Image (cartoon, rainbow, N blue to C red):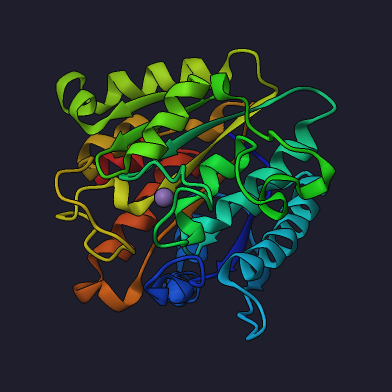
Amino acid sequence: MSTKVLHLIGAEVGEGASDGGCKWGAAALREQGIAQVLANTGRNVTWGDNVTAQALQANTRLEAIEVFSQQLAQSVEKALRHGHQPLVVGGDHSCAVGTWSAVAESLRPSGGLGLIWIDAHLDAHTPETSDSQAPHGMPLASLLGHGSVGMTHLYGWGGKLQAANVVVIGARSYEAPEKALLERLGVRVMFMEEVLERGFAACFEEARTIVKANTAGWGITFDLDGLDPLDAPGTGTPVETGIRLADALPVLAGCSHDPDFVAMELTEYNPLRDFGGRTAQAAMQLVCSVLAPDSQALAMAA
Ligand SMILES: [Mn+2]
């Protein structure tokens, strides 16, 4: 099991989306005891800084996210420097730029970053292709080196992710230019059709093999809208027919046992749409499954 301190960072950002409700996601999960639930599994848990996006009147949304990304990256980098395992709790998915730029920067002396991107969307727009101009539709493209310099070049270098080292699982709502970009770069995308056909377990195993090959460390960014809205209705942008929670939990169990597993990020929890708290419940089960020492037993009990 991982004996590292699990270091929670609240990424309070909703400015990346058209509906800003996800800004309150981290605070809501904190209030509902996400740290205690993780501590109950035996992990040593600490809350680090909360990082809050500021929408300044003079700035565009993209500029606000660029500033926020730098601040979030600093917090994540600090946790890594202390030898902690970061769990970034979003926030809309634009937080992925800060989180994974910091992880890539810290891994850089020893090698590349591997990343499993679980999501209903492709998040691969650039400012040139996006009609909505919402930055939470751009983080994967940014990490691959495509987008505004403020998003692609944190720490002064671009291409935090190599196309060969990332796999998207669960995509089912996207626009043509996003798909075209990922195809051109050669990113492996497991669309929802494939997940339903092969099963989540087979897909995740293949994805893990891909992201671990030729990288120095790997992580998971879990957009809650990757799940089926039956299990997680309270997300920024729900889309029908997603990954079922019961299929995901046992498969994700024990990822953090892997010494190369560096960090996790959980995004797009929108407490304003989470009537009855089902989505918060799903979020806590997911993080416990990935990060808890005895996660197999926990997943079975779920
Ligand atoms: Mn996303």
Corner quadrant of residue 12: bottom right
Residue 35 percent location from the top left of the image? 52, 64
Does residue 117 lie above or below 235 as drawn?
Answer: above
User: Which residue is located at x 39 percent, y 58 percent?
Assistant: 131
Residue situated furthest front in the rendering: 128
User: Which residue is located at x 42 percent, y 70 percent?
Assistant: 22
Corner quadrant of residue 218: top right
Corner quadrant of residue 13: bottom right
Residue 233 percent location from the top left of the image? 21, 62
Q: Is residue 90 left or right of residue 82?
A: left
Locate the N terminus by quadrant: top right
User: Which residue is located at x 78 percent, y 58 percent?
Assistant: 74
Residue 146 percent location from the top left of the image? 60, 40
Q: Can residue 30 be seen in this snapshot?
A: yes
Does residue 179 lie above or below 125 as drawn?
Answer: above
User: Which residue is located at x 22 percent, y 35 percent?
Assistant: 247
Q: Can residue 40 be seen in this snapshot?
A: no
Residue situated furthest bottom in the rendering: 57
Residue 171 percent location from the top left of the image? 30, 38
Q: Is residue 240 left or right of residue 15?
A: left
Name the foreground residue: 118 vs 259.
118
Q: Is residue 175 left or right of residue 100?
A: left
Does residue 280 lie above or below 118 as drawn?
Answer: below
- Tell me how many marks there are: 0
Name the foreground residue: 263 vs 97.
97
